[in-house]
Image (cartoon, grey):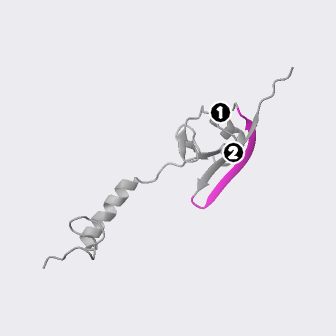
């Protein structure tokens, strides 16, 4: 009696600013995310990927490396953020206030609907 493992089709995706790599694989349904990523060869192509630091997900939802996936799932390897988005928005708002292009009360774009104080 032979034991058959169900094969599933998945994609492993890694995106850089000017290049996106999509690798399509047929793997056993029992394989973990880490095993699938290792089998894909993406770690050899991009040695900067560190699975201990880089987060991974399936269709934009974070998952652990020991999770299993379903047929036609897309495993995404995320790059770390270079800057904190909240900090960037805060600095941009401060610059707009000092330049006079922001509403002094709200810090946002000046509204033409707001009554001017004369």
Q: Is residue 43 above or below residue 107?
A: above
- Label drawn at residue 32: 1
Query: Which residue bears the numbered disc 2?
Result: 72
Q: Which of these two is toward me, 12 or 16? A: 12
What residue appears at the point 29 percent right and 69 percent down from the top-left corner? 96
The part of the image, by quadrant, that contains residue 25 is: top right
Q: Is residue 21 magenta?
A: yes
Mark 2–mark 1 distance (CA, rounded to whole Å): 15 Å
**Residue at the left extreme?**
118
Q: Can residue 30 be seen at all in this image of the molecule?
A: yes
Along the horizontal axis of the image, is 16 left or right of 35? left
Magenta residue span? 17-29
Q: Quadrant of the N terminus?
A: top right
Q: Quadrant of the C terminus?
A: bottom left
Q: Could you tell me which secondary element the residue under label 2 belongs to? A: loop
What residue appears at the point 67 percent right and 34 percent down from the top-left corner? 35
Q: Is residue 101 magenta?
A: no
Task: Please tell me which of labels 2 and 1 falls first in the chain.
Answer: 1
Q: Is residue 74 above or below residue 34?
A: below
> Overall secondary structure of the magenta stretch?
strand
Q: Neighbour class for label 2 at 10 Å: few (<14), some, many (≥20)?
A: few
Q: Which of these two is toward me, 20 or 68? A: 68
């Amino acid at each position: 009696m032979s034991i058959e493992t169900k094969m599933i089709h998945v994609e492993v995706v890694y995106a850089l600013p000017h290049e996106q790599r999509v690798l399509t694989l047929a793997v056993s349904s029992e394989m973990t995310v880490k095993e699938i990523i290792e089998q894909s060869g993406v770690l050899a192509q991009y040695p900067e990927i560190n699975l201990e630091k880089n987060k991974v997900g399936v269709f934009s939802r974070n998952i652990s490396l020991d999770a299993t996936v379903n047929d036609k799932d897309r495993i995404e390897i995320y790059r770390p953020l270079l800057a904190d988005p909240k900090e960037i928005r805060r600095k941009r708002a401060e610059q707009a206030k000092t330049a006079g292009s922001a509403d002094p009360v709200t810090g946002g774009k000046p509204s033409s609907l707001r009554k001017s104080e004369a």
